[in-house]
Amino acid sequence: MSASVVMLRPQERVDEDEGAIMAIFDRLGPDPGKKLVSRAVGELALAVTVMGAQVERHEVAGLPRGLRRMQAMAAGLGMVSLAQVAEDARTALVGGDATAFAAVWARLVRVAERSLVGV
């Protein structure tokens, strides 16, 4: 009998609402809008990096607050999928389901990579 291992490579579909960024540009103008969006995307990327280090060290006490902030920022930028997955990660963490949190965290990292690279 031969055993084989199949490596799964999840592909995430990322939903975005372009209207949110357009509203920022309409409200602030092109140059200030671009600066605001760039700064917010940078903050989101940094947040994922910092929270990732906290997850690796099992220092999760401050993560619910960070995930709530990430959700709000992502929603404000029209990053619908990232906002939803941040909420899902927070729910799993607050609910004390370590297995679900680990799975959702892995998904959050994949969605963040796809969301933040496309901006």
Image (cartoon, grey):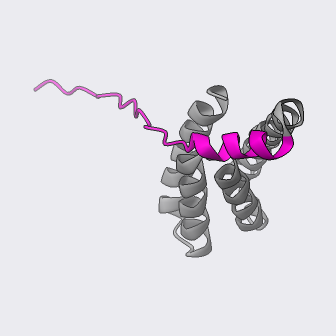
Q: Is residue 8 left or right of residue 36?
A: left
Q: Is residue 49 visible?
A: no
The answer to whether 89 is drawn above or below residue 4 in the figure is: below
Q: Is residue 27 above or below residue 116?
A: below
* Residue 48: % across, % down: 72, 44
Task: Give the main secondary structure of the magenta stretch.
Answer: loop
Give the side of residue 90 with respect to residue 11, left or right. right
Q: Which residues are magenta?
A: 1-28
Q: Horizontal and vertical percent for residue 113?
A: 61, 32
Q: Against 99, is 103 above or below?
A: above
Q: Nearer the viewer, residue 51 or 20?
A: 20
Across and down, in percent, residue 40 comes to: 80, 42
* Magenta residue check for 26: yes
* Residue 65 falls within the magenta-colored stretch: no
Q: Quadrant of residue 13?
A: top left
Q: How many marks?
A: 0
The residue at the point 51 percent across, 45 percent down is 107
| 68, above or below 27, in the image | below
Q: Quadrant of the C terminus?
A: top right
Query: In terms of depth relative to the viewer, which is nearer, 103 or 118?
Result: 118
